[in-house]
Image (cartoon, rainbow, N blue to C red):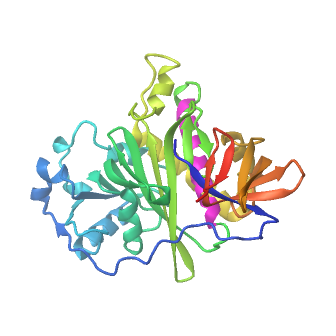
Amino acid sequence: MRSHLFHLVRNPLPTPSFFYLPKARLATTIRLSNLSPLMASTASDINSTSSLVLCGKSLAENEIAKTIKKNNTLKLPDSSEISIILRSELDNKFLKVDSFGIDLFMNSLSTHKFGRFLIWSPRLSSTHDVVSHNFCELPIGAVCVADVQTKGRGRSKNVWESPLGCLLFSFTLQMEDGRVVPLLQYVVSLAITEAIKDICDKIGLPSVDVKIKWPNDLYLNGLKVGGILCTSTYRSKKFNVSAGIGINVNNEKPTTCLDMALREFSMKAYQFKREDVLAAFFNKFENFFDLFMNQGFQTLEPLYYKTWLHSGQRVIVQEKNEDKVIEHVVTIQGLTSSGYLLAVGDDNQMCELHPDGNSFDFFKGLVKRKLE
């Protein structure tokens, strides 16, 4: 079980810094080789580890794809050469059965901004690296999807290898108010859980009840089924945010998946499609993001609290004071305006719980400062 890091703060400050700002982008640009339509139609090209397929929902977005390929400006954090292929150049007969269905996704998408420009790869080290290192080259709302990911990024520099059956994607967005940037990950978490419910409602099956474990994990029947990562850089008075999600859709290992939950209702149950989940996510997220930007997170808070695992949870906070370990029993109340956990002690004193050098085991109800 993966621990989370926290710091107990009495009498919290109004707007502490929470969101991780990564180091400046690499200045070097890696050369990319553009494939001709003839080359793009070979199975070895599309199934290599270095192929990116670009596609847009509209003519305008497909023109952007052509420009990106022509200008050859994309970059990655390592020295790998990659091949750029336009969707129009791709011969479907060379796609594998379990390849991401670009057309199916686009036909299910009804957004005005998010998800309309897509980058797909059958195998990629990290979707997050693609969007974060090419942020300025991509339209806002662009998404990168991979069938298999070998170096997926998690919190605290964790690296995850994800098998076939996972939905693995990262997308771009911009925000101006740095005070609300930390709350974005909660909007993303809520959108994916509600999107899954929307799919279940559409097919007439009981909802798969995915829960949120603060700050950015997704749980199903007590097992981790997914996670969220948001990173940002500040440029030209705007926060350039890269948001990534990994969720087990069809793969039962290493923990559980959405399909397993459906099979509890019926052996002949509908099988989730990654394309449907991604489209449903963006359709929901675009609506939630507009509410978040225009009315604040408080508009979404009641729904968020119905979905997370922590309302009323009592935990023991352990702190070291010289040679003694002092314990405080606190009850989680909700979130602060800055995105931290808000808790109240048995002495009625309010406190915030921060990710900062301490371990937090929600399932054991323990917050513990890492003692030397």
Residue 96: image x %, image y %?
22, 39
Given residues 192 and 223, the one toward you in this image is: 223
Given residues 166 and 236, the one toward you in this image is: 166
Which residue lies at the image location 49% right of the left edge and 17% below the top edge? 266
Given residues 160 and 28, the one toward you in this image is: 160
Residue 245: image x %, image y %?
47, 51
For residue 209, say whether it is visible: yes
Provide the residue span drawn in magenta: 181-201
For residue 42, say whether it is visible: no
Please indicate whether residue 227 sits to the left or right of residue 6 in the image. Answer: left
Please indicate whether residue 333 sits to the left or right of residue 126 in the image. Answer: right
Residue 72: image x %, image y %?
24, 74
Which residue lies at the image location 75% right of the left edge and 59% below the top edge? 352
Q: Is 174 in the magenta?
A: no
Please indicate whether residue 92 sits to the left or right of residue 347 in the image. Answer: left
Please indicate whether residue 188 sits to the left or right of residue 45 in the image. Answer: right
Q: Quadrant of residue 354 in the image?
A: bottom right
Classify the position of the C terminus by image quarter.
bottom right
Q: In the displayed structure, would residue 326 be above or below residue 81?
A: above
